[in-house]
């Protein structure tokens, strides 16, 4: 199971500061075996700071995310490797089932079969939708706030300018690193789930995130909540959690979370919330350069001009070829980059290149799909094997034409030579069978929600050896969205109902 994260109280010049740790990171399910993996991260733990309890504003150490937060995903399974002689499991016992504590990092949510419009907006790499166009969502456009409330043009239109918080707003300034943050997505699922007030907080927090090297940069927005209440914290946390799920390029928020505090005027008639990074991002230039270069290099090798299913397939295949599952994540601290897209494209915080857990796989795939003009959602939930035991996990949904499809890149990363024991005869022989290995590495590609929730492969992933023995590399699994985020934040993940495309059809067209 995911290990709880205990955040130490942090004193701040902002009285009543709340640290928002982020809810998008989590462990990833290792693909090649179905063994349970524990997620070392409990992102979004709601703790109170002892230093702030005497103030009139409640301090919440949840860095703007829920408890399924920052690591939040267990390695629920990485099925797909055999254990010598053990049908359906690999050496390490990971036989297609996840440990009830292994991968899930985000709180996905309940489902509603719609989503956003199907159109690709302005096409591949299109501009952000009109409601957020000037909010600086893509390319690090550091547009100044549209008013004293610290929100940006076009977002949170119903939010009022903050009078009680005016003095807490920093003067508009362009951070030297602002141009390094790129996200050309036309669709941001979790932003669209927020109320107008939540969008105003989101935009203020996003503006703060785009000023990682500007010390003391603060944005303040007026809100209609009572400080110290669950509703107040939920308003901020739903917005900041949405940012982490929508923006994989802001991976550094794991190490430099956003903090917030509530302010009231003298008469207590007006309330505002001020947001600020809890620490400056000193390594910004180096890490963002490495990240951007790695993404650019990855995309240069991808076929991005074909039809959607083939573009998505090419990205998926290259990603699982590049990344290896972090088998040692249990010893990683809560802010390790193993839970981020940076871990996938560059390295985790222990210097292991292209190594991460399920959250890293899902965040990396999410970002690549976004930059390729695809509508993508980062989803968190629970996954496990046929025994009913589930652990936290993270995956993606992608929209093709009018329908959503599920992809679990982590569990598809089966028979990875970097993490699979090739001294085991069963793994070695199965890996040498190109067609079997190829099918195994696409079994969670473009599924429906119904298939994903009750995956019954039958004998499809059982390898029959010449000596009469057989090993099952995936005997079935179950993935379910974490509905806690719907109950707490109102996030809804659409049902994946697409059936027009599947891997077998694409493989036939490609002659695989």
Image: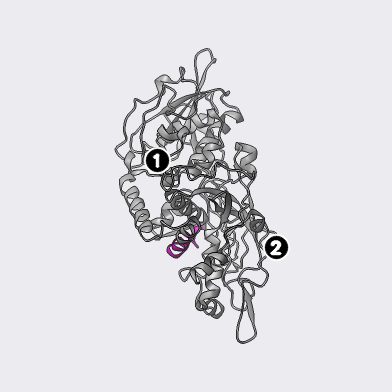
Q: Label 2, on which residue?
A: 387
Q: Quadrant of the N terminus?
A: bottom right
Q: Is residue 216 magenta?
A: no
Task: Single out the mark in the foreground, 2 or 1.
Answer: 1
Give how far across and how far down residue 31 sits, in percent. Answer: 54, 64
Q: Secondary structure at mark 2?
A: loop
Give how far across and how far down residue 320 sits, in percent. Answer: 47, 63
Q: CA distance from mark 2 to mark 1?
A: 44 Å
- Name which of mark 2 and mark 1 comes first in the sequence: 1
Nearest the viewer among 172 and 396 is: 396
- Asked if 108 appears above or below 30 in the picture, the reply is above
Q: Residue at x 45, y 59 (%)?
A: 315
Residue 460 in the figure: left or right of residue 189: right
- Asked if 94 appears above or below 381 in the picture, the reply is below
Name the outermost residue toward the left: 176
Residue range in magenta is 316-329
Give how far across and how far down residue 63 sits, in percent. Answer: 50, 38
Name the outermost residue toward the bottom: 467
Q: Which mark is residue 138?
A: 1
Quarter residue 169 falls in: top left
Q: Dot 2 surroundings within 10 Å: few (below 14), some, or many (20 or more)?
A: few
């Amino acid at each position: 199971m995911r290990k709880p994260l205990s955040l130490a109280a942090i004193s701040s010049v902002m009285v009543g500061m709340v640290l928002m740790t982020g809810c998008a990171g989590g462990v990833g399910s290792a693909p090649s075996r179905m063994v349970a993996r524990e997620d070392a991260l409990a992102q979004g733990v709601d703790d109170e700071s002892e230093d702030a309890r005497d103030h009139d504003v409640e301090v919440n150490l949840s860095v703007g995310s829920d408890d399924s937060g920052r690591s939040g995903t267990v390695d629920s399974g990485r099925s797909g490797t055999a254990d010598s002689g053990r049908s359906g499991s690999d050496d390490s016992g990971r036989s297609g089932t996840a440990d009830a504590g292994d991968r899930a990092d985000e709180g996905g949510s309940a489902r509603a079969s719609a989503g956003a419009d199907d159109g690709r907006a302005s096409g591949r790499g299109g501009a952000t939708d009109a409601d957020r166009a000037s909010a600086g969502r893509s390319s690090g456009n550091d547009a100044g706030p549209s008013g004293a409330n610290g929100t940006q043009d076009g977002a949170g239109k119903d939010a009022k300018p903050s009078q009680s918080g005016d003095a807490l707003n920093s003067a508009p300034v362009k951070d030297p690193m602002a141009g390094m943050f790129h996200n050309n997505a036309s669709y941001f699922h979790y932003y669209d789930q927020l109320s107008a007030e939540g969008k105003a907080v989101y935009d203020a927090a996003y503006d703060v995130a785009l000023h990682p090297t500007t010390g003391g940069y603060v944005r303040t927005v007026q809100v209609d909540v009572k400080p110290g209440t669950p509703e107040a914290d939920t308003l901020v946390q739903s917005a900041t959690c949405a940012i982490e799920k929508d923006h994989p390029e802001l991976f550094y928020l794991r190490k430099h979370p956003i903090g917030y505090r509530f302010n009231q005027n003298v008469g207590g008639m007006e309330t505002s919330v001020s947001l600020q990074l809890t620490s400056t991002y000193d390594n910004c230039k180096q890490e963002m350069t490495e990240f951007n270069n790695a993404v650019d290099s990855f995309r240069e090798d991808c076929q991005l001009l074909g039809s959607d299913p083939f573009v998505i397939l090419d990205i998926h295949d290259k990603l699982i070829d590049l990344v290896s599952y972090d088998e040692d994540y249990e010893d990683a601290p809560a802010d390790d980059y193993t839970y981020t897209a940076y871990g996938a494209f560059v390295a985790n915080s222990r210097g292991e290149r292209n190594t991460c857990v399920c959250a890293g796989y899902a965040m990396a795939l999410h970002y690549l799909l976004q930059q390729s003009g695809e509508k993508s959602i980062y989803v968190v939930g629970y996954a496990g094997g046929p025994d009913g035991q589930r652990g936290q996990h993270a995956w993606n949904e992608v929209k093709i034409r009018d329908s959503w499809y599920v992809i679990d890149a982590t569990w598809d990363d089966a028979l990875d030579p970097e993490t699979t024991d090739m001294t085991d005869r069963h793994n070695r022989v199965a890996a040498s069978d190109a067609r079997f290995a190829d099918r195994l590495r696409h079994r969670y590609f473009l599924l429906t929600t119904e298939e994903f929730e009750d995956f019954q492969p039958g004998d499809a992933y059982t390898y029959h050896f010449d000596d009469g023995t057989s090993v099952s590399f995936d005997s079935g699994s179950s993935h379910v969205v974490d509905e806690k985020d719907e109950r707490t934040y109102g996030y809804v993940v659409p049902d994946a109902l697409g059936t027009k495309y599947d891997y077998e059809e694409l493989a036939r067209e490609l002659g695989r």
